[in-house]
Amino acid sequence: MPAVDKLLLEEALQDSPQTRSLLSVFEEDAGTLTDYTNQLLQAMQRVYGAQNEMCLATQQLSKQLLAYEKQNFALGKGDEEVISTLHYFSKVVDELNVLHTELAKQLADTMVLPIIQFREKDLTEVSTLKDLFGLASNEHDLSMAKYSRLPKKKENEKVKTDVVKEVAATRRKQHLSSLQYYCALNALQYRKRVAMMEPMIGFAHGQINFFKKGAEMFSQNMNSFLSSVADMVQSIQVELEAEAEKMQVSQQELVSVDESVYTPDSDVAAPQINRNLIQKAGYLNLRSKTGLVTTTWERLYFFTQGGNLMCQPRGAVAGGLIQDLDNCSVMAVDCEDRRYCFQITTPNGKSGIILQAESRKENEEWISAINNISRQIYLTDNPEAVAIKLNQTALQAVTPITSFGKKQESSCPRYYLVSPDRCHQKAKSSVPGVLMLCGGAPALGVREGAVEEKVRKWPQNLRNLELENDKIVPTAAARVPDADELIAPGTPIQFDIVLPATEFLDQNRGSRRINPFGETEDETFPEAEDSLLQQMFIVRFLGSMAVKTDNTTKVIYEAMRQVLAARAIHNIFRTTESHLLVTSQTLRLIDPQTQVTRANFELTSITQFAAHQENKRLVGFVVRTSESTGGEALSTYVFESNSEGEKICYAINLGKEIIEVQKAHDLVSEC
C-alpha cells in the first residue's frame, strides 16, 4: 500500500502557518469524508429497510459506490485500490438486486452497524477534538496577548508571574489538544479506507450465507477477490496499529520535555544566543499605526527567505514580502511599554517596521540574523561558514580596555554594524551630494575658475582618486607594519566622541536658548559662511583611539578593525547619527536635530584619511594635536557613512588643496 499522508507531531508545539495550512487540508478531507459517510450510510439503511424496494435500493447503493471516485478528497493518495474495489462491488450489487429481499438482521449486523460505528466514533471524535483544539488555541492567543502587554518598567512581579504561568498552562493545553487532534486526523486516513470496505464485505458475505442461489452467482474468483480485499484491510489495520504506537511514543516524548519550553523568556538571565544565523523564523508582534498617536500590535509569523523578510498570517497558503533586508540596518528600540522591540531601517535611512520578540534570546537572534542577511552572506557558497568566520574574527581581535559599562543603558538606539570583513556587498552608484561654492567669487589669490573646474570634474576625479591622492589608497609598502607598531596594546577605545546636545549647551552656551525652528545660535565657526567648500555627509561615530604613527593608512585600517571587534565582543551596537560638514578649513560634526556643533577638527591637523578597502562605507582619519606638555598626540576617528567613504576622503583632500592654494597666495602677497 502507498504511504499515507500524515501530520508531523513534532510541529504541533510551534504551530506555524505551514502546519496550520496542512491541518486545514486534513480538516477539509475529514469534512468531505463525513459527508460521503453520511450519504453511504443512508444508502445502506435504505437497503436494510426497503425490503420491498430492494432493487431500487441496491441500484442506488451501486451508484453511490461509484461516486467515491468523484469525491474531491484533499488527500486522495492511496485511494486507487479503494476505487477499483468499490467498482467491483458495484457490479456485484447490480447482480444481486433481483435476489433475496429479507436480509434485515444480517444487513443490520454486518453492513449498517460498522459504518454507524465509524461515523459515531471516529468522525465524532475528530469533530470534538477539533472544537477542543480551537478553544485551547484561542486561550493561548489571549494569554500571549496579555503577556505581550506586560509593562517594561515598574513591573508587578506577582502579575508577571501569574501571566507567565497562564501562558505556560495554555501553551501546554494547546500542545496536548493539538497532539490528540493530529493523531486522530492521522488515524482517520487509515480508518476511512477500512470503513469503506468492511461493511461491503459483510454485505457480500450476507448475500452468500442467506441465499441459496448465491452459490451459483459467486464463483471461485469472487471468493479470491473477497479474500484479497480482506487481506488488504488487515494490512491497513496493521499499519494503523503500528503508526498509532509510534505516535503514542512520539507524543510521550514530546510531552515529557522540560517545562521551560512552555515558559516564555525562561533563560532571560543568561540566554544561549546564536549570532551565526543566516535565516530565522517565528512569531513576532508587528506594530501598526491606527491614527496620529495610536498604534496596534498584531501577532504574525515571520520568516526570512534569501534577503527578504516574509510574513504569513494563520490560514494563509504562502507568506508575503514585508521588507528587503539587503544593506538595511537593525536596531533595538524603546517602544512604549513593550519589551524586546527592534526596528529595521532601509538603506536610505527611512524608518521601517517595528517588531516585538517574545524573549530576550529571540530578540537578540532576530537582530543578529537580520544583520547577517543585510551583509548578503546568504549569497556565498557556504553562508553558515562565512557567518561563523566573521564572528570568530571579531572574537579573536584584541579586546581593548574600555570604560563603557553604562553606555548600554543610554537612550541611544542600538545599531548593528557591518563587519569590515564583509566581502559581498552591492555596488553603489549614487552621485555625491551637491558641492556648494559660497561667496559668489573665487578667493583672493586663487585663479578664477580653478576650484569651480575641480568641482565640475568631481566624478572624473573621484574615479581617478587612487592616482591623485596617495593618502586615500596608499601604494604598496615594502613591509606591512605590525599592529603593535601602529597601536599600543591595550589602548582604550572611546565610543562617545560627542556629548548630547543639552550637555553641550550647558557647558558651552550657558543658558542660551535654542531657536525652535532649528536655526543655530552658534557663532563659534563664522568661517563656514566664507568657505569655498561646504560638503555635508550623514555619518555615525563608531569609536576613536590613540595611535603611534600617522605615516601610513594601515593605522586607520587597524583602528577600524579594533573598534568593530570591541563593539562586537562587548555588544555595543548603539550609535548616534550626525552630519559631517567638510569645509575648506575644518571638519564639523553637527547634531541633525539642534544644529549644534558637537566636534570640530582643523583640516591642517588631519594628517591621514582613508576609506576601508572592502567595506566602502567605513571611513577614518588621523588627527595630530598639541599637548600641554609640549608634545603631540595622534588619534584615529572611525565613522560609518550612508554613502561611500571615498567621497568624504575626496572632500577632505579638496579642502586641503584649497588651503595649499591660499597659502601659496599669501606667500606671493608677502613677497
Image (cartoon, rainbow, N blue to C red):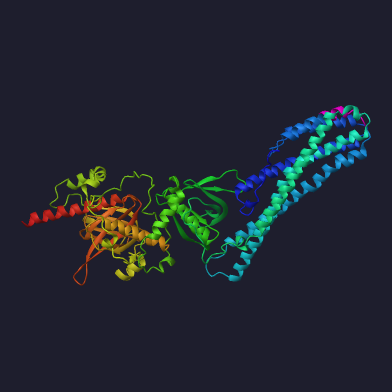
Residue at 64% in and 45% down: 22
Residue furthest to the bottom: 629
In the image, residue 96 lies in the stretch drawn in magenta:
yes
Q: Which residues are magenta?
A: 91-100
Relative to 65, is 23 above or below?
Answer: below
**Does the image show residue 270?**
yes
Q: Looking at the picture, how far across and down is residue 402, in whole percent?
A: 36, 68
Q: Is residue 524 left or right of residue 340?
A: left
| Image quadrant where residue 516 sits | bottom left
**Does the image show residue 39?**
no
Q: Is residue 25 left or right of residue 589?
A: right
Residue furthest to the left: 671
Question: How many numbered marks are there?
Answer: 0
| Image quadrant where residue 115 sits | top right
Residue at 82% in and 34% down: 226
Q: Is residue 107 left or right of residue 143?
A: right
Q: Quadrant of the N terminus?
A: top right
In the image, residue 1 lies in the stretch drawn in magenta:
no
| Residue placed most toward the observer, 503 or 31 | 31
Q: Main secondary structure of the magenta part?
A: helix
